[in-house]
Amino acid sequence: MKIVLNGKPREVRAENLSDLLMELGFSGRVATAVNEDFIPSSLRISHKLVDGDRIEVVAPMQGG
């Protein structure tokens, strides 16, 4: 399936948001949005992806 991840086109196998994060190696706490809608972590496994989805994944950064 073709998606856009953080502004860059990607080809992925995952069918839901939770599997996508695992497939792409994201670990720890991240915030996710699909087509500009925030998806809480509790709903990621049930959020089905479709071809062309625009996904944003943001991780908190430490520093000052």
Image: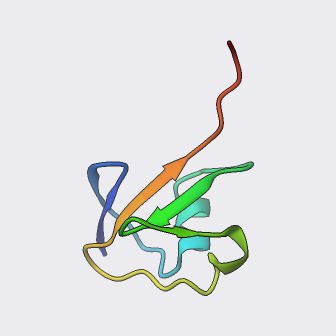
- Residue located 25% across and 73% down the image: 52
- Above or below for 17 versus 6: below
Location of residue 35 by image quarter: bottom left
Residue 63 in percent (x, y) is at 69, 16
Q: Foreground: 5 or 35?
A: 35
Question: Which quadrant would the N terminus be assigned to in this image?
Answer: bottom left
- Residue located 69% across and 68% down the image: 41
Q: On the picture, is 53 further left or further right than 47? A: left
Location of residue 18 by image quarter: bottom right
- Residue located 71% across and 24% down the image: 62
Q: Residue furthest top?
A: 64
Residue 21 in percent (x, y) is at 57, 61
Residue 36 in percent (x, y) is at 39, 65
Location of residue 5 by image quarter: bottom left
Q: Foreground: 41 or 3?
A: 41
- Residue located 52% across and 55% down the image: 24
Q: Foreground: 34 or 4?
A: 34
Q: On the picture, is 32 further left or further right than 28? A: left
- Above or below for 45 versus 40: below
Residue 42 in percent (x, y) is at 73, 76
